[in-house]
Image (cartoon, rainbow, N blue to C red):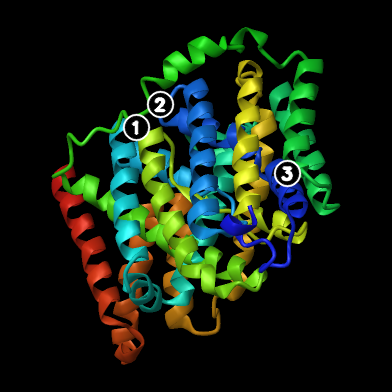
Amino acid sequence: MDKIFQLKNNNTTFKKEVLAGIVSFFTIVYIVVVNASILSDAGIPLEAGIIATVLTSIAGCFIMGIWGNTPIILVPGMGVNALFTYTIVLGMGLSWQEGLAVVFVSGILFTIIAFTKLATIISESIPHSLKEAITVGIGFFLTFIGLQKGGIVVLSEETYVSLGDFSDSSVLLTVVTLLITVSLFAKKIPGNFLISIIIGTFLAAIFDDLSFEKTTNTTEAFRSYFDVIGAMSFDRFIDLTFWTATFSLTMVIVFENIGLVFGQVHMINRPTTYKRSLQANAMSTITSGILGSSPTVSTVESAAGMTAGGRTGLTSITTGTLFLTSLLFLPFIKVIPDSAIAPILILIGSLMIQNIQHIDLEDFSESFPAFLIIALIPLTYSIVDGMAFGFIMYPVLKIILNRKQDVKMPLYFIAFLFLMNFFFHTLHYK
């Protein structure tokens, strides 16, 4: 173990790493339920989505542990899963099988970027304000999805959306569970999201808002998963929509992971592991498409394991191994109601929205394009369209203000691609 993970060189022990891995697992295991729920909205059977999430998380953690040798936990990312389901599949009209092919190709492109200097070039060419705006916009989007899942916000013919029916038990359960989730999180209770889901499910059972008919036989669950693993479809590989989705997904996962990995390797004072950790992240995305899930990302919950003493890849491998145990609860995970899942989405959305403080709101040429991204991601129900408005407006506004020097050449190219996407979409609708 010392040879593989260099435990002594990193001032850690086998026991410390395993304990840190256990802490990371209980902090992030909620993703199994939440990610599967979002994947099911794309058409992937819930039980198959659970297995896909588990296997993708195991693969991601092992790749990071072996190749990156850092305690970073890789699981399907919140926000990116919303991009996969609500934009690529439901918004752009790709099937979930074609969506998985998009994930696979994005993983290949991300890997090429991570193994070359392109990672630095792309990161430096995209303005900081636009990167932060994407995170904030996705945060609002997740919050909106959570409010819808919980019934707090519903469709309205007069005003498009309106307040839900608070006489409905499921809506009340969502509100109560949200209060519990916020309380657990604010008090920094370890495993707060997992505890929240358990309490929310228990409350739903008490108020007879739970259907135990949904329990699934493990054999049947794996049978449904066999229709998902390796189900990627490249039927629309030469279609502009496929490549628009691929381009947008690649940009999001590259921006998000460059920032997260950079921060996390510095947190453990091991900056030299940045390159290999980013490469592990990229390779993990390829396995996501094959195994049937939205892409993996470096999770902010990795910090829990690092705080507990995790310094090497043994931490992430321990977490990955523990994900196997979640399959033991497969027959019961399916009964978890939306009222227990929605509060998690709402709270995670609120955490992502905090990034707005990093945007220079006093510089109009920076703040307005960022505002367009933040506003239009949830309002168009499309992460890609929201990004497009901001990325097109940024160079246009800089040119108007005679500040062309603020725009790097790759950004002009990205803005042009987004503009062409709007043009071809217009032709398609005509």
Q: Residue 153, can we see it? A: no
Q: Is residue 231 above or below residue 218?
A: below
Quick one: label 1 or label 3, which is nearer the N terminus? 3
Query: In the image, what residue occupies the spot 61% across and 12% down?
Result: 215
Q: Amino acid at mark 1?
A: Trp
Total numbered labels placed on residues in the image: 3
* Residue marked by disc 1: 96
Q: Residue at x 68, y 59 (%)?
A: 303
Mark nearer the viewer, 2 or 3: 3
Looking at this rendering, what residue extends furthest in the right direction?
Answer: 187
Disc number placed over residue 22 in the picture, else none: 3
Front residue of this view, candidates 179 and 62: 62
What is the distance, in whole Å, between disc 1 and disc 3 at their CAs?
A: 33 Å
Q: Quadrant of residue 403?
A: bottom left
Circle 2: element type: loop
SS at mark 3 in the image = helix
Instruction: Point out residue 365 in the picture as x, y percentages from the top left corner.
Output: 42, 81
Please, what is the three-letter code of the amino acid marked with disc 3? Ile
Name the side, left or right, on which 333 lies relative to 255. right
What residue appears at the point 36 percent right and 53 percent down from the top-left corner?
249
